[in-house]
């Protein structure tokens, strides 16, 4: 029986590139005739005419589905919106900016056919900006520590994944989805595939420092309690240091009762250090509590304004 491949592509400010990405996928899938395919394009409330381009693509090809989100929810929420629309046996996620090579999707599919649950593209030579590369390295180290990602596993936005893993991922209905965390908690049967990485042809990365920090916070507060444990450990260390310092001061005073002990500057420095640590710990705890509160209030992962398939268009709220 012919397997079906579902492509999911989050789109943001890509009115000039998404058509080229789609055409490359169509050309590639024409060569991979052992598979049928569909393509889900999720417009994350782009400020340009991206969704109009998507609408025209849907009209020209019945295998393409267009989803228009009501506001900007972020890449991972857009992926979750796409996952809830797919019908394929294998789902392939990629970017909308031509940097991910759609013509090499066969390599990912071959790795899935070997028995792996997920196949992540690993770029031989990355063409991202220095800022994006630094952010990727930080993210990799943090996921190793907080989410138990294997050290030799490279995570990217271009990957293929089996349907049963996606079915498990969409059960997560809380407000802050983090696809990497959902994958790692579902399976460890993951492989890397070497592919090329292209230069960006237009525009710049949509990830600012603020968005990267927000994304990291989503993952680490939703899928790990290690930040809380680190806060507790830091508190124990400071308490131990404070206790030992007090013992030393008492013993010093007993040994030299006539010595005048001055320490205004050092006292203020210690107070500021401890106060800063306390505020950081309270901030971490507050972040967890705030996200629990938002989840209890059923804040949606995404809201679909419009869905287009062929010449049909419908408006929905989820």
Image: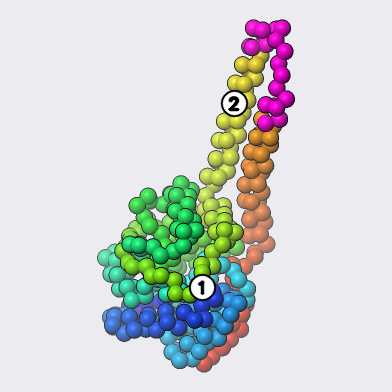
**Which image quarter is the N terminus in?**
bottom left
Gap in Å between the C-alphas at discs 2 and 1? 51 Å
Can you tell which quarter of the image residue 69 is in? bottom right
Query: In the rendering, at what x and y percent does residue 157 appear?
Result: 43, 65
Can you tell which quarter of the image residue 122 is in? bottom left
Q: Secondary structure at mark 2?
A: helix
The answer to whether residue 163 is above or below residue 142 is below
Query: In the rendering, at what x and y percent does residue 249 appear?
Result: 65, 16
* Residue 262 is covered by the magenta coloring: yes
Q: Residue at x 58, y 86 (%)?
A: 314
Q: Which mark is residue 203?
A: 1
Query: In the rendering, at what x and y percent does residue 46 appear?
Result: 58, 76
State which region is magenta.
251-269
Query: In the rendering, at what x and y percent does residue 123 appear?
Result: 35, 63
Q: Is residue 116 left or right of residue 137?
A: left
Q: Nearer the viewer, residue 95 or 108?
A: 95
Q: Within 10 Å of the Cα at label 1, are there few (<14), some (14-19), or many (20+) other Cα atoms?
A: few
Can you tell which quarter of the image residue 113 is in? bottom left
Q: Is residue 68 left or right of residue 144?
A: right
The answer to whether residue 33 is above or below residue 216 is below
Q: Residue at x 63, y 60 (%)?
A: 295
Q: Which mark is residue 241?
A: 2
Q: How is the image coloured?
A: rainbow
Q: Are marks 2 and 1 in contact (CB under 8 Å)?
A: no
Q: Residue at x 62, y 17 (%)?
A: 247
Task: Give the label, 2 or 1, closer to the camera.
Answer: 1
Q: Residue at x 42, y 62 (%)?
A: 156
Q: Secondary structure at mark 1?
A: loop
């Amino acid at each position: 029986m012919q397997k079906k491949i579902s492509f999911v592509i989050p789109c943001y400010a890509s009115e000039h590139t998404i058509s080229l990405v789609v055409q490359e996928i169509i050309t590639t899938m024409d060569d991979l005739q052992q598979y049928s395919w569909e393509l889900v394009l999720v417009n994350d409330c782009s400020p340009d005419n991206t969704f109009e381009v998507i609408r025209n693509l849907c009209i020209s090809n019945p295998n393409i589905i267009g989803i228009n989100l009501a506001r900007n929810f972020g890449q991972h929420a857009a992926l979750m919106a796409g996952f809830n629309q797919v019908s394929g046996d294998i789902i392939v996620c990629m970017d909308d900016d031509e940097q991910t090579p759609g013509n090499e999707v066969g390599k990912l599919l071959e790795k899935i056919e070997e028995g792996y649950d997920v196949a992540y593209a690993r770029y031989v030579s990355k063409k991202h900006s220095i800022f994006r590369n630094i952010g990727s390295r930080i993210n990799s180290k943090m996921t190793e520590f907080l989410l138990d990602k294997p050290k030799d596993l490279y995570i990217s936005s271009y990957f293929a994944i089996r349907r049963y893993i996606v079915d498990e991922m969409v059960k997560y209905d809380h407000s802050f989805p983090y696809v990497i965390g959902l994958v790692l908690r579902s399976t460890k049967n993951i492989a890397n595939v070497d592919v090329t990485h292209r230069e960006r042809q237009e525009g710049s990365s949509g990830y600012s420092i603020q968005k990267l920090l927000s994304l990291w916070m989503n993952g680490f507060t939703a899928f790990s309690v290690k930040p809380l444990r680190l806060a507790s450990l830091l508190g124990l260390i400071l308490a131990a240091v404070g206790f030992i310092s007090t013992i030393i001061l008492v013993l010093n005073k007993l040994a030299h009762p006539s010595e005048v002990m001055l320490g205004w500057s050092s006292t203020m420095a210690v107070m500021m250090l401890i106060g800063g640590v306390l505020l950081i710990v309270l901030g971490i705890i507050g972040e967890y509590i705030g996200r629990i509160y938002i989840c209890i209030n059923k804040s949606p992962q995404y809201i679909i304004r419009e869905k287009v398939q062929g010449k049909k268009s419908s408006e929905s709220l989820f």
